[in-house]
Amino acid sequence: MIVRAMSSSTQPIKTVAIIGSGLMGSGIAQVAAASGHKVTVVDQSQEIVDKASASIQKSLGRVVKKKFPDDSKAQQTYIADVMSHLSLQTDAVDAVKSADLVIEAIVENLDVKKSLFSSLDKAAPPHTIFASNTSSIPIKDIASSTTRLDRFGGLHFFNPVPVMKLVEVIRIPETSDETYSALEAFGKAVGKTTVQCKDTPGFIVNRLLVPYMMEAVRLVERGEATPRDVDIAMKLGAGYPMGPFELSDYVGLDTMKFIIDGWMEREPNNPLFSKSELLNKLVAEGKLGVKSGEGFYPYN
Ligand code: CAA
Ligand code: NAD
């Protein structure tokens, strides 16, 4: 049964709960807090949220160096101000009780996302808008675990969130105009340019980027070049800021695998979505990229 919101969702979003404090959740929390929102970030353990808090402070350290060069007092004040808009905790149900917007940025797994949203749907007030930052899972499949399809959409940020200037705003057929406008306004309020896309695999950016990154892996699997030479080639020959192997390590090889496995399941005959033994092997070995200390390259 779909429950309609009693209060208007055209009110500007002031309080945000972000579930998942990994690469993306901590970046989204940072930009939301820096733009004056009251932000609660949730993850599975105190140890994980403590790590996220440290990584947000480190990232803010980079921001202030640019914003207030040679003024360490202004740098510290800015960081303290942003951090004062943020709280970190481990109870998602409690965090959503006062949220205008919930952004989910947990593992790229449909069942896990559905189970989370189903429990949050019961706890959040009627006016609360739900959004997923999924890279590749249909928003409609995730939204089906809730009774608020009209207040559900996709907000797809890019890594590193404080630097990348885009947010894709995704609507499903049931997303109300008010919800879409509120999501778009939130994307702009955190300083991003927004684009609209239908609920299609990979939306705009990943639909083009992920097949390119996977073809780079297949090229190496065919023995045609080394990862290092492919990366040099794409940076110097095509002007990309990172080569596809550096970028895969940066995104996370587990996330890459979740994306491609999900698409292959949906479109098994699409050659752009075919799997890679090399990627599967690295993930099985726990080599997930920068976040685990090793992927295609080692990181220390
Ligand atoms: N927080 C704050 N600032 C950061 C930062 C962070 N986490 N990371 C980098 N920066 C800032 C730096 O301080 C630096 O600022 P200045 O230029 O003012 O000094 C600037 O960004 C550039 O950083 P660096 O000099 O350290 O390094 P770089 O020039 O190599 O740039 C990069 C780093 C921005 C990550 C660049 O390599 C890049 O754009 N890479 C491609 C990223 C990309 O394609 N992202 C999309 C991935 S796909 C995705 O996200 C979707 C999905 O669903 C999988
Ligand atoms: P990550 O592995 O860095 O972080 C995921 C976090 O979610 C972890 O800290 C984990 O402990 C936490 N988590 C898992 N289940 C949870 C639960 N039930 N409740 C609370 N926390 C939980 O992953 P990430 O790279 O930040 O990706 C998160 C989402 O964002 C995924 O859907 C991914 O596809 C998407 N995304 C990733 C990128 C990228 O470049 N990595 C870019 C855009 C979107």
Image (cartoon, rainbow, N blue to C red):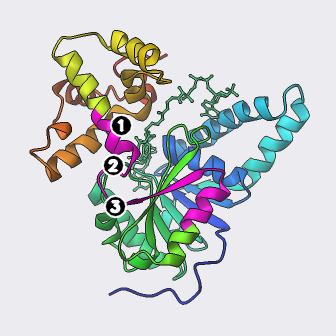
Ligand 1 neighbours mark 2 (CB distance < 8 Å): no
- Report, in whole angstroms, how far the alpha carbon at label 2 lies from the one at label 1: 9 Å
Q: Are marks 2 and 1 in contact (CB under 8 Å)?
A: yes
Residue 202 part of the magenta-drawn span? yes
Q: Position of residue 10 (x, y in %)?
A: 61, 78
**Residues under labels 1 and 3: Cα distance?**
17 Å
Under mark 2, the amino acid is Gly
Distance from mark 1 CB to nearest ligand 1 atom below 8 Å:
yes
User: In this view of the protein, which residue sits in the foreground, 134 or 282?
Assistant: 134
Q: Is residue 55 above or below residue 216?
A: below
- Which circle marks residue 209 in the picture? 1
Q: Where is residue 75 in the image (x, y as percent from the top left)?
A: 83, 35
Q: Is residue 22 visible?
A: no
* Res. 268 in view: yes
The residue under label 2 is 202
Q: Where residue 104 sits: x, y (%)?
A: 46, 58
Q: Give the range drawn in magenta.
A: 183-211
Q: Quadrant of the N terminus?
A: bottom left
Secondary element at tag 2: loop
Residue 199: image tag: 3
On screen, 4 above or below 247? below
Residue type at mark 3: give it: Asp
Is 72 left or right of 174, judged from the image as shown?
Answer: right
